[in-house]
Image: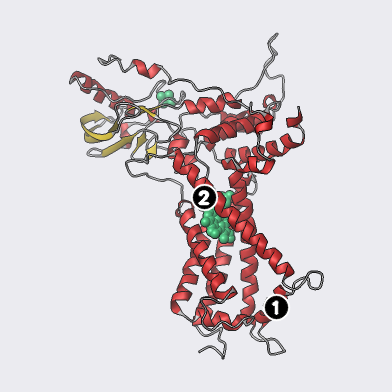
C-alpha cells in the first residue's frame, strides 16, 4: 500500500512497550490475604456471589415465614404469624438471651448487604474506568439480557425498598397503625394502602429480575461450572426468581383482596 | 451468483491521533460486488480517497483469513459485524443490502487507546500474556512428539481455548470493557494440559492480576462469547475464576513460602 503521508509505517510499529509485570510482586508489600483477594475484580465477584447466596437464602426463608399469615389464628386465638415473630425473637432462648439469635442474624445480614453494595460500587467504578469514552453509535447487544444490564438499577431500587420495609414493618416509623409484636395487624395496616402495596409489588418484581441474572451468574463467578449441570442453572435462576416473586407479591394482593384482614384495621 | 450492491453509505469514525477528538465522517460507496469482503470494500474506498489526495481510513488487518487476530471494527454496534463466529476479515458484503448505512467504529476501551481512525493499540493483551501465558520448557534434545498422553476430551477443550486469536472483540463487545474471555482462554488452554501444570496457579494469579490493571470486570453478560470470532465459551471464564480462587488459597498455604 502506498500512502503519501507515510502513516502506513505507523501500522507496523507498536507503541512503547510497558514493563513486564509478571508475578514479581514483593511478598512483603501484599495486603492481608482477604483484602488482597478483595482488591481484584475477580475477588469482588466472589464477594458479590457469596453475599448474593446468603441474601437469597434469607429472602426465601423470609418469604416462607411470611406464608404463615395464611394460617390465620392458632388455637390460643393469636395469629400464627405473631407466634412466628415471637419465635424469632426467642430463638435459641435460653441458650442465648432473648433477641440474641435475632441480632446475630441481623448483624450478619447488615454486614452481608454492606459487602454486596461495596463490591457492586467497586465494580461499577472499575467498569466506568475501563471504558471512559462510550461507543458513539448504538450498540446491538446479542446476549446481554435486560436483567444483566439493569443489575445496578434493580439493586438500588431493592435497597430503597429494604430501607422502607424496615421503617415500615420492623420499626413502624412509616406505618401509622403500627403495634409492636402484632405482625398480622401491621401487615394489613400497611399493605391496605394502595401506593405501599404497589411499591411492594414493583420492588419484588425487580428483585426477581435481579435474581434471574444473579442466580445464574453466581455459579460463573465462583467457578462452579460443570457441563453436566450448566443447562440447569437457567432453570434454577428462573425457579428462584419465580418462587420469590410469586410468594412475596401474593401478600399485598391478599391484603388488598381482603384475604388477610385484621379486625382492628379499618 | 454475483450481484452488485449499490448506494451504500458508510459512517466511519475518523480520528487523527491518540489524543485527538474524533468524529464520524460519511462516505458513499456507489457500487460494490457482494463477493467483496468488508475489508476489500474499505480498500476500494481508500484507493479512491488516496486518488482524491485525501487521507485514507486507517484500520488494522493482516492475514485476512481469520487466523491472526489483527482486524477489528465495531460494525453497526457489533464487534466484527453481524456474522457469528467470524472476524471482520471474513465478513462479506453479501451480508448487507443495497442502500444500507453501515456505521464503523473502533474498539473502545481505556486499555485499547486509539492510534488513528479505526486502529487501536492492543498491547495490554501482550502484558497479560507476558505475565503467564507460556510454559517453561527445558532446552536440550527435542523430546518425541506426543510423549505425554492427554485424554482426547481434555486436548479438545484446551484446543477450543487455544483458538483465541487475541483480536480483542471480547473487550470491545463487553459492556464493562472486561478482558475476562481473552485472559481465561489463555489461562485455560495451558492450565488444562499436563505441560501447563507446573506454573498453573502462578499463571492464573499473575494473568488475572495483570488483567485487572487494564480492564473492566465481568458481569457475566455473555456478549464476549457472542462476539468471539472463534466462539470461545464463557465456560473458560468459570474455569479461570475457579483456578484463581484455588491459587489464592494454595499460595497462602504453601507456594508463597518458597
Ligand atoms: C441492596 C441492594 C443491592 C444492590 C445495590 C445490588 C447490586 C448488585 C449488582 C450491581 C450486581 C452485579 C455485579 C456485577 O457483576 O457487576 C449484583 C449481583 C448480584 N446480586 Fe445484588 N444488589 C442488591 C441486593 C441484592 C439482594 C437482596 C440479593 C439477593 C436476594 C442480591 C443477589 C445478587 C446476586 C445473586 C448477584 C450475582 C452475583 C454474581 O454475579 O456472582 N442482590 N447485585
Ligand atoms: S486480518 Fe487476520 S484475523 Fe482478520
Q: Tell whether circle 2 marks a residue whose Cβ is less than 8 angstroms from ligand 1.
A: yes
Residue A75: mark in rendering: none
Q: Residue furthest front?
A: A28
Q: Respond whether the residues carrying marks 1 and 2 are from the same subunit.
A: yes
Q: Residue at x 63, y 57 (%)?
A: A111
Quadrant where the N terminus of chain A sits is top left
**A198 up-or-down from A111: above or below:** below
* SS for callout 1: helix
Instruction: Please give the chain letter of the residue carrying mark 2.
Output: A
- Position of residue B25 in the picture relative to residue B204 (left or right): left
Instruction: Please give the chain letter of the residue carrying mark 1.
Output: A
In space, the residues marked 1 and 2 are separated at their CA atoms by 36 Å
Q: Residue furthest right?
A: A95
**B113 up-or-down from A204: above or below:** above
Q: Residue at x 46, y 47 (%)?
A: A143
Q: Position of residue B157 (x, y in %)?
A: 61, 33
Q: Position of residue A234 (x, y in %)?
A: 56, 54
Q: Residue at x 24, y 29 (%)?
A: B32
Q: Position of residue B195 (x, y in %)?
A: 68, 24
Q: Earlier in the sequence, mark 1 or mark 2?
A: 1
Ligand 2 shows up in the quarter that is top left
Q: Position of residue B4 (x, y in %)?
A: 23, 31
**A105 up-or-down from A43: above or below:** below
Residue indicated by mark 1: A86
Residue indicated by mark 2: A121
Amino acid at each position: 500500500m502506498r500512502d503519501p503521508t507515510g502513516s502506513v509505517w505507523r501500522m507496523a510499529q507498536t507503541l512503547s512497550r510497558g514493563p513486564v509485570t509478571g508475578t514479581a510482586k514483593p511478598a512483603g508489600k501484599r495486603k492481608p490475604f482477604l483484602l488482597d483477594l478483595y482488591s481484584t475484580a475477580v475477588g469482588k465477584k466472589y464477594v458479590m456471589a457469596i453475599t448474593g447466596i446468603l441474601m437469597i437464602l434469607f429472602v426465601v426463608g423470609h418469604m416462607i415465614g411470611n406464608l404463615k399469615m395464611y394460617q390465620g389464628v392458632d388455637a390460643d386465638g393469636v395469629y400464627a404469624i405473631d407466634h412466628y415473630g415471637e419465635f424469632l425473637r426467642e430463638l435459641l432462648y435460653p441458650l442465648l438471651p432473648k433477641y440474641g439469635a435475632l441480632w446475630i442474624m441481623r448483624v450478619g445480614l447488615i454486614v452481608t448487604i454492606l459487602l454486596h453494595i461495596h463490591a457492586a460500587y467497586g465494580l461499577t467504578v472499575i467498569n466506568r474506568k475501563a471504558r471512559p469514552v462510550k461507543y458513539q453509535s448504538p450498540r446491538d447487544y446479542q446476549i446481554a439480557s435486560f436483567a444483566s444490564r439493569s443489575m445496578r438499577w434493580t439493586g438500588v431500587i431493592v435497597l430503597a425498598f429494604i430501607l422502607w420495609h424496615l421503617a415500615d414493618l420492623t420499626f413502624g416509623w412509616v406505618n401509622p397503625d403500627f403495634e409492636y409484636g402484632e405482625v398480622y395487624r401491621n401487615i394489613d395496616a400497611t399493605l391496605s394502602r394502595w401506593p405501599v402495596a404497589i411499591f411492594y409489588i414493583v420492588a419484588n418484581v425487580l428483585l426477581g429480575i435481579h435474581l434471574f441474572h444473579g442466580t445464574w451468574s453466581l455459579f460463573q463467578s465462583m467457578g462452579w461450572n460443570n457441563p453436566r449441570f450448566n443447562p440447569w442453572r437457567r432453570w434454577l435462576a428462573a425457579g428462584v426468581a419465580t418462587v420469590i416473586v410469586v410468594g412475596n407479591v401474593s401478600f399485598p394482593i391478599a391484603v388488598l383482596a381482603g384475604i388477610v384482614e385484621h379486625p382492628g384495621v379499618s | 451468483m454475483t450481484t452488485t450492491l449499490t448506494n451504500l453509505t458508510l459512517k466511519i469514525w475518523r480520528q487523527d491521533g491518540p489524543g485527538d477528538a474524533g468524529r464520524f465522517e460519511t462516505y458513499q460507496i456507489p457500487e460494490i460486488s457482494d463477493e467483496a469482503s468488508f475489508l476489500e470494500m474499505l480498500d476500494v474506498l481508500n484507493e479512491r480517497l488516496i486518488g482524491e489526495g485525501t487521507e485514507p481510513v486507517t484500520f488494522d488487518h493482516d492475514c485476512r483469513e481469520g487466523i491472526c487476530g489483527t482486524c477489528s471494527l465495531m460494525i453497526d454496534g457489533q464487534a466484527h459485524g453481524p456474522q457469528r463466529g467470524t472476524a471482520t476479515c471474513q465478513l462479506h458484503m453479501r451480508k448487507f443490502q443495497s442502500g444500507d448505512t453501515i456505521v464503523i467504529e473502533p474498539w473502545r476501551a481505556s486499555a485499547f487507546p486509539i492510534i488513528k481512525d479505526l486502529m487501536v493499540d492492543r498491547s495490554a493483551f501482550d502484558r497479560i500474556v507476558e505475565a503467564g501465558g507460556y510454559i517453561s520448557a527445558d532446552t536440550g534434545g527435542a523430546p518425541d512428539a506426543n510423549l505425554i498422553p492427554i485424554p482426547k476430551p481434555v486436548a479438545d477443550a484446551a484446543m477450543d481455548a487455544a483458538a483465541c486469536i487475541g483480536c480483542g472483540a471480547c473487550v470491545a463487545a463487553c459492556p464493562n470493557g472486561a478482558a475476562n474471555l481473552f485472559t481465561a482462554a489463555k489461562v485455560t488452554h495451558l492450565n488444562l494440559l499436563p505441560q501447563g501444570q507446573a506454573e498453573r496457579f502462578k499463571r492464573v494469579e499473575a494473568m488475572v492480576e495483570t488483567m485487572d490493571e487494564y480492564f473492566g470486570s465481568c458481569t457475566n453478560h455473555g456478549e464476549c462469547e457472542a462476539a468471539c470470532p472463534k466462539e470461545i465459551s464463557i465456560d473458560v471464564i468459570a474455569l479461570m475464576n475457579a483456578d484463581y480462587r484455588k491459587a489464592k488459597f494454595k499460595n497462602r498455604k504453601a507456594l508463597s513460602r518458597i
